[in-house]
Amino acid sequence: MNFVRKQYVHFNCIGLQTDNLKTSEIGSFRWICNTCKSKSTTSGSTRTKLDKIMSELASITKNQTEFVKSLNFYGDKIQELEKKFKNIESFDNRMNDISMEMSALKNENLKLENEFNIMQQNMKSTELDIIGVPEKKNENVAEIVKMVSSKINFPSVESTIHNCNRVHFSKDCQNFFPNLY
């Protein structure tokens, strides 16, 4: 059995000229041929798909813009942190320099203290304290030292005397040393 399927089409849709065609034969009803229907459906669904794609693209573009803003924001924060880190490194280097300088100054201070102690010991090694000799007006302290050294049979000190001074003690110190005359 052969089924003949009737199909109605617009002449333009199948490439025929409609100049010689009587429009009265087609009738006054409105219809759309299958070719036009598929074009209309395809173009409608294509339009819908295209609108959907454009909407998604706009959303992606918006998200991309927000992402770029976020990247720029965090990039700026990273640059700020890098600057702070460099400042910390600079501060740390300065602290190391100060620490080394302090160490050098401590060593220099110890050296000077040792030299001062040695100088004091040298001075004390040649110093003679005579206590209990009453003070007289216009006295010659060097002569008193020579006289005291001869009385105690101490070898001659004349050549070793560089300087003689009388040291005055406070009243508290005078009470500590009894008078020896």
Image: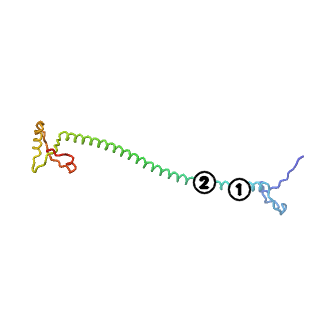
Q: CA distance from mark 2 to mark 1?
A: 22 Å
Residue 70 screen position, x and y as percent: 55, 53
Q: Nearer the viewer, residue 173 or 179?
A: 179
Give the residue number, with chain letter if any, for mark 2: 63
Residue at image position (66%, 54%) is: 53
Residue at image position (60%, 54%) is: 63
Residue 89 screen position, x and y as percent: 42, 46
134 up-or-down from 157: above or below = below
103 up-or-down from 36: above or below = above
Q: Quadrant of residue 17?
A: bottom right
Residue 5 screen position, x and y as percent: 85, 51
Element class at badge 2: helix
Residue 126 screen position, x and y as percent: 17, 40
Marks 2, 1: nearer the viewer: 2
Q: Nearer the viewer, residue 73 or 51?
A: 73
Of the 4 image quadrants, the one containing the C terminus is top left
Q: As shown in the figure, which amino acid type bears the numbered disc 1?
A: Thr
Residue at image position (82%, 55%) is: 8
Q: Earlier in the sequence, mark 2 or mark 1?
A: 1
Q: Say whether residue 2 is left or right of residue 180.
A: right
Crowd class of label 2 (few under 14; some 14 to 19; many from 20; radius 10 Å) = few
Q: Say whether residue 62 is left or right of residue 24.
A: left
Q: Quadrant of residue 145?
A: top left
Give the residue number, with chain letter if any, for mark 1: 48
Res. 157 mark = none
Disc 2 to disc 1: CB gap under 8 Å: no
Q: As shown in the figure, which amino acid type bears the numbered disc 2?
A: Asn
Q: Nearer the viewer, residue 133 or 65?
A: 133
Crowd class of label 1 (few under 14; some 14 to 19; many from 20; radius 10 Å) = few
